[in-house]
Image (cartoon, rainbow, N blue to C red):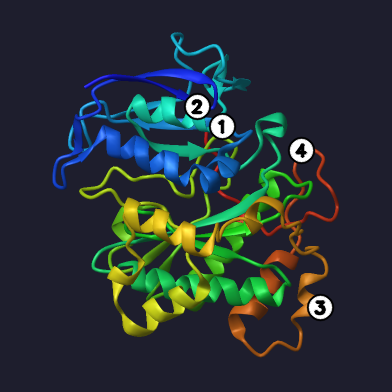
Amino acid sequence: MDSTIEVQGKQLKLSNLDKVLYPATGFTKQQIIDYYVRIAPAMVPHLAGRALTRKRYPNGVDEEFFYEKNAPQHRPDWVKTAPIWSEGNRRTVHYILADDLPTLVWLANLAAIELHPSLALAKDITCPTMMVFDLDPGPPANIVQCCQVGLWLREIFEHFGLQSFPKTSGSKGLQIYVPLNTPTKYELTKTFAHALAQLLEQEHPDTVVSDMKKNLRTGKVFVDWSQNDEHKTTIGVYSLRARERPTVSTPVTWEEVERTHKKKDSTLLVFEAKQVVARMNKVGDLFAPVLELKQRLPDLKQVATTAVAEPQPTISLAAQAVEEPKRPRRRTVKKTAKQPPSARGPRRKV
């Protein structure tokens, strides 16, 4: 079944609308498009101006998929793109900017089920507007254990005067966002995130792991600090996931996180497309502050003095870790951005 529609003055030809892309539930391409249309008022502001990586499933979530970064040659002339130099590919990649509803509908019609935006705006790709922690449970651990780790992170952030916002990954984990919206660099956010991941592991070795090796994750929560990188993306808020059912990466409240941890019930943080639209219509966009809240990571020289009297060991350790000076490096760095050697991530070619 094909159809031609007009969306905000733009003509779009939609194809194979009755094609089932979630076989287990019978969820069709038309239902995917309908979901993205309904969630667009909350979702588009989080995509706008950001280089977008798409994960496409032309034959459904059970079949082969592919990542797409470059904009297709055959695209409507009104679809905006951003040219960004790729050091790894030695060429300019023209990323799509999903700045409006017509573009979101066009992407859904291409079976771009998962949408992964950059943590930075395309106009300043080296400046992330947020810091992210992706909490990934290794079975038999699940999102309940992720909730505990998320609450530990919130405690540290609150001590430093920072607000944080949780959302489900839409898969099996939890993600914590710390909005910044102030001048910064990935070197700082990644180093800071790595330090906190290592310290949580040190304080809670039976629950947390900061090393990427999968064989270390059994029964623990991997605190993925490495997402804070110019060359990586995290699943966008409100994006569908290519799981058995049409689950969504859903913003949640800290009260919901606490309740899930208390009741040990992982199903409390599983939301499908229809539920997410209803939630958004009822409570609005819980992630709206991530777009505008201006925060700065603490001055690494002052962190220790703010935690000297703090009796809780995790916070004290965090203060000590980010205070320690790092070894001199060949390139020039700001004197106020000293980090410990242990907090630096592995060097990798991208």
Residue 78 shown left or right of residue 275 in the figure: right
The reply to whether callout 1 and callout 4 are in contact (CB within 8 Å) is no
The residue located at (46%, 13%) in the rendering is 75
Q: Position of residue 54 (x, y in %)?
A: 42, 31
The reply to whether callout 2 and callout 1 are in contact (CB within 8 Å) is yes
> Residue 65 or 284: which is nearer the viewer?
284
Which of marks 4 and 1 precedes in the sequence?
1
Q: Residues within 10 Å of mark 3 (few under 14, many from 20)?
A: few
Tag of residue 100: 1
Q: Is residue 171 visible?
A: no
Residue topped by disc 2? 103
Which of marks 2 and 4 precedes in the sequence?
2
Specify the amino acid type for callout 4: Arg
| Callout in the foreground (4, 2) | 2
| Callout in the foreground (1, 4) | 1
The Cα atoms of the two marked residues, 1 and 4, are separated by 44 Å
Residue 335 shown left or right of residue 145 in the figure: right
Q: Is residue 248 visible?
A: yes
The residue located at (62%, 51%) in the rendering is 190
> Residue 145 or 52: which is nearer the viewer?
52
The residue located at (33%, 71%) in the rendering is 268
Residue topped by disc 4? 330
Q: Position of residue 184 (x, y in %)?
A: 75, 47
Specify the amino acid type for callout 2: Thr
Q: Residues within 10 Å of mark 4 (few under 14, many from 20)?
A: few
Helix, strand or loop at label 1? It is loop
The Cα atoms of the two marked residues, 2 and 1, are separated by 6 Å
Residue topped by disc 3? 305
